[in-house]
Image (cartoon, helix red, strand yellow):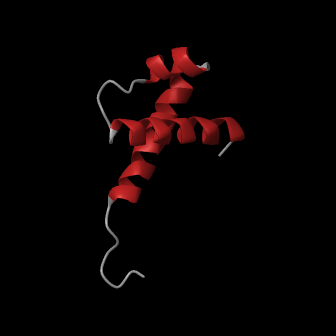
């Protein structure tokens, strides 16, 4: 993952945490306007960020320690 994409995903994760999880209004075009970059880059970052956020929120499976 490129440094630019990693930063974008981190920004998405911060937004998700601030909002208490994914919300429909978290759109790539909005993030592109606020933080710069292209909407397609932010679309990928939102997708990656949502997946990472879901992994964080999902409890560990029993015996997975």
Relative vertical location of residue 55 with respect to residue 16 in this rendering, above or below? below
Residue extending farthest to the bottom is 63
* Residue located at (30% from left, 32% from top): 23
* Residue located at (53% from left, 17% from top): 34
Of 26 and 38, the residue lying toward us = 26
Tell me the quarter of the picture where residue 16 sits.
top left
Judge left or right: residue 30 versus residue 63. right
Count of numbered tags:
0
Residue extending farthest to the top is 33
| Residue 44 locus on image (x, y percent) | 50, 34
* Residue located at (31% from left, 75% from top): 61
Residue extending farthest to the right is 3
Tell me the quarter of the picture where residue 11 sits.
top right
* Residue located at (52% from left, 28% from top): 42
Relative vertical location of residue 63 with respect to residue 43 in this rendering, above or below? below
Relative vertical location of residue 65 with respect to residue 5 in this rendering, above or below? below
| Residue 55 locus on image (x, y percent) | 39, 58
Q: Quadrant of the C terminus?
A: bottom left
């Amino acid at each position: 993952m490129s440094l630019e994409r990693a930063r974008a995903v981190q920004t998405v994760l911060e937004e998700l945490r601030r909002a208490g999880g994914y919300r429909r209004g978290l759109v790539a075009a909005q993030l592109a306007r606020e933080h710069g970059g292209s909407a397609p880059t932010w679309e990928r970052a939102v997708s990656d960020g949502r997946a990472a956020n879901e992994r964080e929120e999902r409890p560990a499976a029993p015996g997975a320690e």
